[in-house]
Image (cartoon, helix red, strand yellow):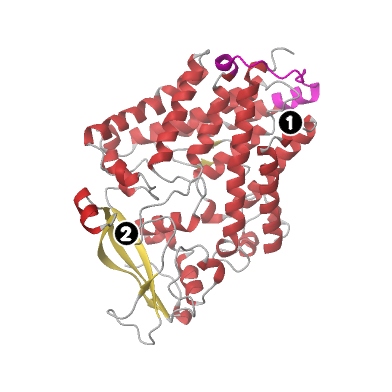
Amino acid sequence: MDWFTAPGYWLGRLVFQRALAGVYLFAFVAAALQFRALIGAHGMLPVPRYVRYVPFRRAPSLFQLRYSDRLFSGCAWAGAAVAAALAAGAGDLVPLGAAMGMWALLWLLYLSIVNVGQTWYSFGWESLLLEVGFLAVFLGNARIGPPVLVLWLLRWVVFRVEFGAGLIKMRGDSCWRDLTCLYYHHETQPMPGPLSWFFHHLPKPLHRVECAANHVTQLVVPVLLFTPQPVASYAAGIIVATQLWLVLSGNFAWLNWITITAALPAIDFTGLTGAPPPAAARAAPLWFVVLVCAVTVLVLVLSRHPVLNMVSRRQVMNRSFDSLHLVNTYGAFGTVGRIRDEVVVEGTAEPVPREDGQWREYGVKGKPGDLRNIPRQFAPYHLRLDWLMWFAALSPGYARDWFGPFVERLLAGDRDTLRLLRHNPFPDAPPLYVRARLYRYRFTTWRELRETGAWWHRTLLREYLPPTRLAEASWSEPE
């Protein structure tokens, strides 16, 4: 069946599989290290409570059948171990069926986590990892050539990621159309990186070039993925380069890395390097051919809703249309903020809280806090609390479900919650009161940085949560 495989793309498949396993590894490690405070049995949004009200058909997961923190931890670390093995090349050392089983296990374990993760796992890159991970099950290993149909399905994923994001920008904020969005974006993005301050201070004409290049990369280049080689390779290369630019300019968990990973199989590495395919590769077995054809038909059928969403004037971002996250719709930054507000959480040990009392600030890992701390690089690792704190500053409605439980755990000195923070100002005993205040943050200028050593400047806006003690730690939206 010469039509079924493309042996020349063996190197692209190898790079793709190693990179995807690496992304899976970050995802599982992040889940293992953060879940107890977020969704554990005693977490802010406990899985046992969630599965009591959400049926299996709406959120299929192994944890619908049974949950314990020990089981969740075991699944997360098992996923990390399998991902590490696949990153090291274990999938090419076993029979085809065994390799497919390893990839399927990763997909099943991570699906089980995402489907009970609630708000903490509501990001588009979760669905993107699951969609790409599902297709990886059917990409084969070194014993057969890469299936042509799956290679095209991966291009279809990249097309929807880029083209969908491009459309929602053009339909959304006017600053994308007048090429001014990047005047603000590097400063107001959810989690700036160590170079974001410098990106923000680039000349405005260069920001306009960035914006125009983004439109070309997202609205024109993805179409070229479906053209003959070498044009498709050039298109994939442009997408990879653009995603690396985004990696340098901010922290977006593994969104950029999984997009790069999915684009790699479109590059004809063999044509570029002249490396011959492995001699061990042979014809695909009939059962595998039938299975890949069936999966291709399934993906095409499920693509109906994402395509209708893309062409709709009411296009939405980051939506899954099936509970298995097999074919999804994507998009980012249809609206760009012009200002940056941050929720700063403080505690005091004083028995009577006073406005001018001794309040100590909790340090955070990724989002802005201390004015003299330059933003750090965390991506592709995902700091879920930091991301949700950014949303909480946009609107208290985004924090309705979890902010009260978060404050309760600070007042109780919960170790798992404190591990999510950069700095605990109460190492000996928890505070008696906790409050939250809303600040307006902005990057300092070159002159301010030289004079003060501060990367940020902030101004107090208002109270976000009044002083609260443990018996009172219930959350209601401020008026």
Return the x and y of residue 20 as percentages of the image width and height: 60, 37
The magenta stretch spans residue 289 = yes
For label 1, the residue is 92
On residue 239, the disc is none
Q: Which residues are magenta?
A: 270-293
* Numbered label tally: 2
398 is higher (above) or lower (below) than 108: below
Q: Evaluate whether residue 321 shows in this view.
A: no
For label 2, the residue is 372
Q: Residue at the spot x=48%, y=75% of the render?
A: 427
Q: Amino acid at mark 2?
A: Arg
Return the x and y of residue 329 as percentages of the image width and height: 50, 37
Q: Is residue 393 left or right of residue 123?
A: left
- The first of marks 1 and 2 along the sequence is 1
Q: Evaluate whether residue 289 shows in this view.
A: yes
Q: Amino acid at mark 1?
A: Asp
Q: Is residue 468 left or right of residue 25?
A: left
